[in-house]
Amino acid sequence: MIKALLKRLLLREKSSSRAFIDYWQNQGVAIGKGTYFYDPQSNCLGLNDPFNLSIGSNVRITHGVTIVDHGYDWCVLKGCYGDVLGNTGQVSIGNNVFVGMNAIILKNVSIGDNVIIGAGSVVTHDIPANSVAAGNPCRVLMSLSEYRDKRAAAQLNEALSLFRAYRKSHSGKVPPKEIFREYFWLFERPGKNGFCSCEAFDRVMHLIDDSFELSISSASSKEPMFNGFEEFIKYCCLQDSKVNLINEEGDNVR
């Protein structure tokens, strides 16, 4: 309690996502519901005029993200030619957008709905809705539906890698199901009421405002790959033993 109070007093508007949002909304930035700044202490909104920035609903802004509505490069022109040439523009971020770590979003940029901006990107021009974009300068890499297919295809291998990493760091112990909170759809589907077999899965189901019913609908449209957690773990153990056997055979050859 005291620690939280000291944090609010010392960091003020950067003490939490809620405090950061409240501060900038009071300054004139439009920010929709469900938007979250993961690390406001590292985020920079470099705004000459806060009304130049609008952020939609359910936007996730991660560590080190910078958003600016101006450029002071005109000071060089003024120093050389004496001209005062303003350099200001608007920034618009749509709904259901994820902005990766250390991305920079410059003025005169509009990011559409349902967009993923990769870590370290420098966004210098508009990014259309339903797309995945990254790079410097940021460019569209694929559509959101293509990215969904890519991520779906990677689920089993990633879950298996997580299984192996846990066993390696926990003296060969089998991971508890909570470790697979982002992969539980491989072996479990939530009930009709949306509840799952453990709290960690429930939290994932409720992540992102207004998406709970959509997740239930998606879950009911397909069967899990495995018939329960035990079957999934047996598969992981079998795959792990195959890798160990191959490694042992390789050692014997050497």
Image: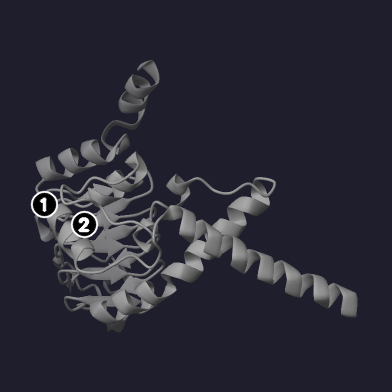
- Residue 159 position (above or below residue 50): below
Please report the residue visible at 58 percent of the width from the left and 49 percent of the height from the top.
Answer: 174
**Percent position (x, y) of residue 114?**
19, 69
Image quadrant of residue 109? bottom left
Image quadrant of residue 143? bottom left
Please report the residue visible at 25 percent of the width from the left and 69 percent of the height from the top.
Answer: 222
Q: Nearer the viewer, residue 53 or 237?
A: 237
**Percent position (x, y) of residue 127?**
21, 77
- Residue 202 position (above or below residue 233): above
Please report the residue visible at 19 percent of the width from the left and 43 percent of the height from the top.
Answer: 21
Alpha-carbon span between mark 1 and mark 2: 8 Å
Q: Nearer the viewer, residue 137 or 156?
A: 156
Whether residues under marks 1 and 2 lie with C-beta atoms below 8 angstroms apart, the answer is: yes
Quadrant of the drawing holding the C terminus? bottom right
Please report the residue visible at 38 percent of the width from the left and 63 percent of the height from the top.
Answer: 186
Q: Which residue is mark 1?
A: 32
Compared across the picture, whether 122 is left or right of 217 comes to right
Within 10 angstroms of label 1, few (less than 14), some, or many (20 or more) residues?
some
Residue 8 appears in the rendering: yes
**Percent position (x, y) of residue 233?**
52, 57
Say whether disc 1 or disc 2 marks the residue closer to the N-terminus: 1
Within 10 angstroms of label 2, few (less than 14), some, or many (20 or more) residues?
many
- Residue type at mark 2 is Val
Compared across the picture, whether 52 is left or right of 188 comes to left
Q: Nearer the viewer, residue 250 or 98?
A: 250
Residue 254 appears in the rendering: no
Rendered image coloring scheme: one colour
Q: Which residue is mark 2?
A: 59
